[in-house]
Amino acid sequence: MTAAKEYIEHIYQKVEQRGAHQVEFLQAVREMFDTIEPAIAKNPQFIKWNILEQLIEPERIITFRVPWVADDGTIQVNKGFRVQFNSALGPYKGGLRFHPTVNESILKFLGFEQMFKNSLTGLPIGGGKGGADFDPKGKSDEEVMRFCQSFMTELQKYIGPLEDIPAGDIGVSGREIGYMYGQYKRLNGAQSGVLTGKPVSMNGSLARTEATGYGLVYYTEEMLKANGQSFKGQKVIVSGSGNVAIYAIEKVHEYGGTVIACSDSNGYIYDESGIDIDLLKQLKEVERKRLTDYAERKEDSSYYEGSVWDFDVDYSIALPCATQNEIDGEKASRMVKNGVYCVSEGANMPSNLDAIHVYLDNKIFYGPAKAANAGGVATSALEMAQNAQHGHWTFERVDQELQVIMKNIFKTVEETASEYDLAGNYLAGVNIASFLNVANAMIFQGIV
Ligand SMILES: NC(=O)C1=CN([C@@H]2O[C@H](COP(=O)(O)OP(=O)(O)OC[C@H]3O[C@@H](n4cnc5c(N)ncnc54)[C@H](O)[C@@H]3O)[C@@H](O)[C@H]2O)C=CC1
Ligand SMILES: O=C(O)CCC(=O)C(=O)O
């Protein structure tokens, strides 16, 4: 075993000892550690600085009680969190997730990946993530507002435009960000730079809503082009039907591909002629309905229960945009059998480690989440820039900057993989490039 490998395994054992039950976090660390040996072997100072042990420990985890009153008068209590993972490259930056499954392991995996992802954007942002085990589904607007106000009453003590700037994630969109900003302002005065993903009328950025989905397609098109392919004429499946999925579908259609299926947490719709994006937006963004309503309103479309990745149909590109671990080894093998040659991740860690092995063994063009979905946070950093200069940029300007950022990320990934004699292994390119960004910044700052 090389010294680099021995060091990596020694630190991994420590992570396991400290939190064997944190399975999502362990998975994210394992995936990273499995690819960075060449970078550690080439840079022995990382061992001297014990950089991995510093990296895997969040700078701070804040947990708090979130009490609120439901419409029926009952008193509800949820658990709130903010994981301030790493500030080597700038203030903590990353979304808030409101979902019943939220726990410390999930937020640590998300924060860990966020610090690496953010470094790939080239913008001055560190990594963080937060949220609560609150389910906005089925709640009235008033209940969501009261929850958001209680959540922010505590969170506001720890965030600020130069310290920590949360944004949205699963279950947190413009509505929730609006309520949280209202409460922040009531307690601290108007400082719009404290949250991103704000509604445009509240100093949000144009194109932030679209950015993660559009960015995913810009990144994937670059990867396809580098391999003599493109979206044009391709059949695509997108999982999810939330913010990331909707704008990924819209951009795939603009690029000449056809998205034939998308999903929610219960099932999926198949629409061979291509998902009707206007209908999907109306159902999901306006009416907050389920996908069963799509099949009821759109002729020749069908709804099926279960995972969209178990659907046997010919297609070539898979864009998972729902949630973590939605694809296991079996589902990945099924995709390959169905003709998939490209998988690019809008969701964070949607593929488990077995699925990733299937992609690598089958030479799938693979866009790991840390790179492929970085367009959302990159545009959040553009929103911060606009807020700092008290100005607004046009949609075209933000979208143009987003395209440049996503192209540059792919270029960095491709070049890094080649530099380490791993040409075409985009997973290694993503992990090594982002690891070097964060590790070097930490060394510059000393032991802090
Ligand atoms: N919103 C953003 O800017 C960014 C989001 N992401 C990631 O993208 C993914 C989706 O986030 P958003 O679209 O923002 O959230 P959202 O709340 O708008 O939509 C989430 C979608 O995933 C589906 N979903 C949730 N749990 C599921 C499950 N267990 N099985 C199948 N489907 C499930 C929901 O039905 C919904 O369609 C998440 O992994 C998030 O972390 C990543 C980068 C930025
Ligand atoms: O826009 C942001 O700050 C956060 C985006 C996010 O949560 C993510 O990239 O997973």
Image (spheres, rainbow, N blue to C red):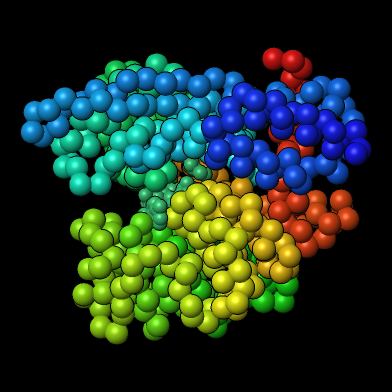
Q: Position of residue 412 (x, y in %)?
A: 74, 52
Nearer to me, 123 or 117: 117
Task: Kindly identify the residue that appears in the image at 8 percent across and 33 percent down.
Answer: 72
Most extreme residue toward the left, as rendered?
72
On-image quarter of the N terminus: top right
- Height in image: 250 above or below 242? below
> Image check: 282 left or right of 351?
left
Q: Position of residue 125 (x, y in %)?
A: 59, 33
Task: Kindly identify the residue that appears in the image at 53 percent across and 48 percent down.
Answer: 348
Query: How many discs appear?
Result: 0
Which corner quadrant of the image does residue 302 belong to? bottom left
In this view of the protein, can residue 293 be seen by the observer? yes
- Height in image: 81 above or below 94? above
Q: Position of residue 388 (x, y in %)?
A: 48, 31
> Image check: 365 left or right of 132?
right
Nearer to me, 84 or 387: 84
Q: Position of residue 32 (x, y in %)?
A: 70, 42
Which corner quadrant of the image does residue 366 belong to? bottom right
> Image check: 287 left or right of 56?
left
- Height in image: 172 above or below 22? below
On-image quarter of the C terminus: top right
Which corner quadrant of the image does residue 341 belong to? bottom right
